[in-house]
Image (spheres, helix red, strand yellow):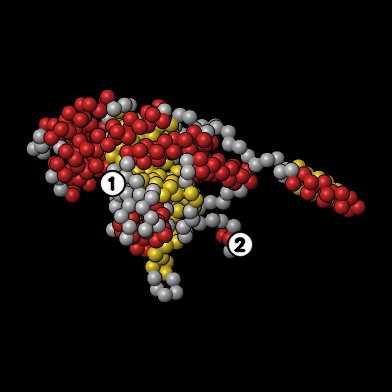
Amino acid sequence: MIQKRLHTPEGVRDIYNEECGQKLILQETLQRVLWQYGFSAIETPSFEFFDVFGQEIGTVPSKDLYKFFDREGNTLVLRPDITPSVARLAASYFSEDDMPKRLWYQGHVFINNSSYQGRLKETTQLGAELIGDDSIEADAELLVLAVRLLLAAGLTDFQLALGHVGFFRSLIQAADLDEDVTAEITALIENKNFFGVEEVLAPLSLPPALKELFGKLGGFYQNTDSLEKVKELAKDYPEVAKSIDRIAAVYEVLVLYGVEGHISIELSILSPYHYYTGIIFAGYTYGSGEAVVKGGRYDHLLSGFGKNAPSIGFAITIDQLMATLYRQKISLPGLQECRVIEYAPEELKDAIKQAEALRLQGESVLLQKR
């Protein structure tokens, strides 16, 4: 029985000693960057009413939520995603405010993943949301901020894949594909099996330009010039063309910021979060099998809470970021070395005086009795 008390449940872990200190310092470093870009800190509860993350919101499936009940019988959930919580907060406290709001948060999220996946079920997220701005400049600002945060963490070799959810959705609508075929193609794209997508579409009677546009899902584009062929193919599909134009316009602003070296255009990027409506992006680097940052535009999410406000945001999984830094052998700053002052019982008064003086100067001091 005692041995069981010493173990944590599957999917969660203790963080202690140097690793915990490094995590705190990393978070402080990232918070400083968010402050430099004019973002204000907020906190939301670790658990919310089930409706905040319900199916109509388009977040994590119900089966992956940690659900429980309060004394009144209301269904509550541990938050699996902080963005809907931010949307609820913004609709609650800024309902009459039409000025854009720049908000950042840090907190734990909880997802009941299948055990065989080997993922943590509790992770720390740090994210930023720009509420009430549907501009191209807002899209670019959040992408730039994500780049600046990863650079501040110590990463140098990384890429943010930039896409638009409207590209794939518009292709599906133009091709008039049923749900089963759409689900099959989506699964193939998520597994980067673009040859499989071609095989599924091959027997269908689709216009050649439309089939070729599906074929562009597997491409990577380093600048807007490389999108010209895609734009030409999309000229008869207005919604597809609109998504390409948005990507190109955002990219041009990113060039002004000088971060284009960390940006690649990837038309196949998808998200399990159905509330995304426009630009979408994810940050990848070597030593990590998953994205260290994910985000996108969600122009209708706040309307589910009673406020019409186009928005864009992203989240960095701190645990994933730290693991990546370790694998790349990027040194993380640790806590300041603690000075130890040993004293005999009769020296206590002088030892306390010396220790307090040093602490007032910003040093870390430990008093140790001999």
Q: Which residue is mark 1?
A: 277
- Residue drawn at x 36%, y 41% as measured from the top left: 138
- Residue furthest to the bottom: 72
Disc 2 crowd rating (10 Å Cα; few below 14, some 14-19, many 20+) is few
Q: Which mark is residue 220?
A: none
Give above or below for 98 relative to 158: below
- Tell me where residue 183 appears, x and y as whole percent: 22, 47
Give above or below for 361 relative to 213: below
Q: Gap in Å between the C-alphas at discs 2 and 1?
A: 51 Å
- Residue drawn at x 16%, y 38% as measured from the top left: 238
- Tell me where residue 112 appears, x and y as whole percent: 41, 55
- Residue furthest to the left: 205
SS at badge 2: helix
- Residue drawn at x 39%, y 52% as measured from the top left: 83
Position of the N terminus by quadrant: bottom right
- Residue furthest to the top: 225
**Quick check: can you spot residue 275?**
no
* Residue type marked 2: Ile
Disc 1 crowd rating (10 Å Cα; few below 14, some 14-19, many 20+) is many
In the depicted view, which residue is nearer to us: 370 or 193? 370
- Tell me where residue 356 appears, x and y as whole percent: 78, 49
Q: Nearer the viewer, mark 2 or mark 1?
A: 1
Report whether 279 appears left or right of 363.
left
Report whether 257 appears left or right of 166.
right
Q: Which mark is residue 2?
A: 2
Label 2 or label 1, whichever comes before in sequence order: 2
In the depicted view, which residue is nearer to us: 323 or 160? 160
* Residue type marked 1: Thr
Q: Are marks 2 and 1 in contact (CB under 8 Å)?
A: no
Locate residue 84: give its quadrant. Answer: bottom left
Locate residue 254: give its quadrant. Answer: top left
SS at badge 1: loop
